Amino acid sequence: MRSEPLIDPKDTSANVIGELPDGHVLRAVSPKKVKGFLEIETSLLGAHYRGFVLSKYVKPAGRGAMATAAPGVKAPTPQIPAVYMPRRPGTVTKRTQIAGAHSLNEPQQPSRKGETPDELRAELANIISYLAVDNPRHERYTPRSDLTFCNIYAHDYCYLAGVYLPRVWWTPRAIEALARGENIAPLYGDTIDEQRANDLFRWLRDFGLRFGWRRSATLSELQTEANQGAIGLIVARRKQDGRSGHIVAVVPETEEHRAKRDRSGEVVAPLQSQAGAVNFRYGASRREWWRGAQFADNAFWLHA
């Protein structure tokens, strides 16, 4: 799906605004084709899109098919419960330790419980300051031996903010058993596995709505909602599955740190916080890094 009815032969992904799954139902804004493109609108995992698709890739859906144009999507009730790595009583997982599958449980961790945008922004700033992803003493996020920990930092940011983004998740066999109503214990390597960036891309797509996530169509919406105290993510799935994808938090702007905008005021590079090859608390990063040739797909996500 593209923002304009054209494909730049020098950069075929330049105006792509979304990837639509096979069989997805669209609504034609007009039956008239423009340079072989059809203007459409649709809702995809909670995000409202309006753009252009090549008409040769679409066909009439027939009677009874419905394309939802409104962005609001009611998340289904979770039938598969959230899960965390079990820990022995009395053990503490610290920022200064090399990361494992456990979530942080240090004393006096900050949280997000505010009721106004000002309170929520201040609490998210406290979480970013507390995690201090760029502090070399915080080995939980420090890259080593070609390993980076964007997934762990994103989990920690969401976890302290009271939003579920899994550090571990149920295996397919365990999900089948849970769906049958069976009581399944979380056992590492048996019923639960660690979630890396590529896994989180798929988890958000497949389970995100059940846990309050919705997809966002634009960077401006992503930044605006983050500025109101919501949790924003950008996630990109690596083409080569054994290689690292990437996930970053989109965070509220501050007096010192701002997103990048074009002349019309639209966000072209949101304010981000990440662990990766380079760790930073606030930064705009490389523009549209998620469109890199190493990535197969990308998505923007929001949680209230």
Image (cartoon, grey):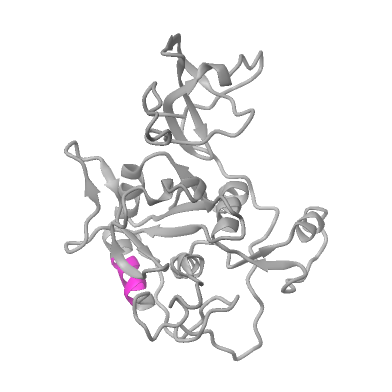
How far across and how far down the image is residue 114, in percent? 35, 64
Q: What stretch is highlighted in magenta?
A: 122-129
> Dividing the picture into quarters, in which one does residue 39 lie?
top left
> Dividing the picture into quarters, in which one does residue 35 lie?
top left
Query: Is 118 inside the magenta-drawn segment?
Result: no
Q: Is the magenta stretch mostly helix, strand or loop?
A: helix
Of residues 13 and 99, the one drawn nearer to the viewer in this rendering: 13
The answer to whether 87 appears left or right of 124 in the picture is right
How far across and how far down the image is residue 52, in percent? 43, 23
Of residues 128 and 82, the one drawn nearer to the viewer in this rendering: 128
Residue drawn at (47%, 58%) of the image = 246
Residue drawn at (45%, 70%) of the image = 160
Query: Is 126 inside the magenta-drawn segment?
Result: yes
How far across and how far down the image is residue 205, in percent? 58, 47
The answer to whether 145 appears left or right of 9 in the picture is right
Up/down of 23 relative to 254, above or below:
above
Q: How many labels does the image show?
A: 0
Residue at the extreme top of the image, as rendered: 32
Up/down of 181 relative to 59, above or below:
below
The answer to whether 221 appears left or right of 214 in the picture is left
Residue at the extreme front of the image, as rendered: 10
How far across and how far down the image is residue 274, in percent? 39, 65
Residue drawn at (41%, 71%) of the image = 111
> Dividing the picture into quarters, in which one does residue 112 lie?
bottom left
